[in-house]
Image (cartoon, helix red, strand yellow):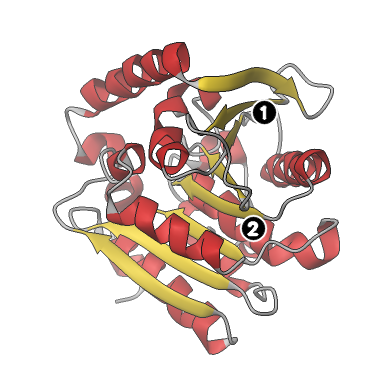
Amino acid sequence: MALADIDLEAEYNNRARVPDHPMHMAGWERDSAAYRAIAHCELDVAYGPGERHRLDLFQPPGGDAGGPLIVFIHGGYWQSFDKSSSSHLARGANERGFSVAVPSYDLAPHITLSGIVAEMETAADFLMHRTGRPLVVTGHSAGGHLTACLMARSPKALKRPIVAGMPISGLFDLVPLVSTSVNRALGLSVEEARRLSPIYATPPLDSRVVAVVGGAESDEYRRQTRAFAEQWGAMDASTRVIEVPDAHHFDVIAGLADPGDVLVETLVELAAGT
């Protein structure tokens, strides 16, 4: 089906698709605050000069096993939220022996999307320099887009390529967003949207990607996830798709807080090969 025949506003308006989304967002804040209160963590570590250039580091309760560092990038269509709503999502990997970093970034319209991508590159370089470890990157929604961007740009933009990632409900082709209300804050032209779309980029050599999407998400989110995996797979990346049964856009990430969940197991598998 051509884009002109799709109600793109309805397909990408996740809050309208999930009427009880405020309950889920409130739950993120509550669970995150509760986890910060008990976790072994270092909060508000500066990776850059800006007020939002901060990240939180969560260490395993039994000590770090010495593997790659896992990075979780929050969503919000690049224009809402910060690291404080995602702390609880470090729990699952922490309990499997991995340290987790959760960064904030500046938000549109106060910064361009290109600027946000650059901030995440700065955060990634900071973390690799500080820890001396490779990164496994994951992120939700806009964070899924940033996960794929980091991987694609890492051979040229970072000190060390990022070859393992798990974008969740990611946005890999931004062109469909240009005509939607999402673009009011972003101000993307079609040309810029395409340039910032990781589906059109080349994955790093020997990269491994697991793209996750909820089974109850819109047709467009599920299409984008499949198309991204197929495109990068055709360029010699190892790719697969996980569709979380019955999950919508706001609960698809819940499994990251559970050390036995398939999402955490997938991160462990990606880390093992890094």
- Amino acid type, mark 1: Asp
Q: Are marks 1 and 2 in contact (CB under 8 Å)?
A: no
Q: Is residue 183 left or right of residue 274?
A: left
- Amino acid type, mark 2: Cys
- Is 114 or 257 nearer to us in this picture? 257
Q: Quadrant of residue 152?
A: bottom right
Above or below for 30 versus 95: above
Q: Residues within 10 Å of mark 1 (few under 14, many from 20)?
A: many
Q: Which residue is found at the position 73% from the left and 16% from the top?
A: 51
- Is 108 or 154 nearer to us in this picture? 154
Which one is earlier in the sequence, the residue at label 1 or at label 2?
A: 1
Q: Which residue is found at the position 84% from the left and 22% from the top?
A: 49
Residue pointed to by mark 2: 149
Q: Is residue 8 visible?
A: no
Q: Is residue 171 left or right of residue 215?
A: right
Residue 164 screen position, x and y as percent: 58, 64
- Name the mark on residue 49: none
Q: Is residue 218 visible?
A: yes
- Name the mark on residue 106: 1
SS category of the residue bearing label 1? loop
Residue 174 screen position, x and y as percent: 53, 58
Q: How many marks?
A: 2
Residue 4 screen position, x and y as percent: 36, 67
Q: Is residue 69 left or right of residue 177?
A: right
Above or below for 32 versus 76: above
Q: Which residue is found at the position 47% from the left and 72% from the top?
A: 228
Q: Can you name the residue that lies furthest to the left here?
A: 246
Q: CA distance from mark 1 to mark 2?
A: 16 Å
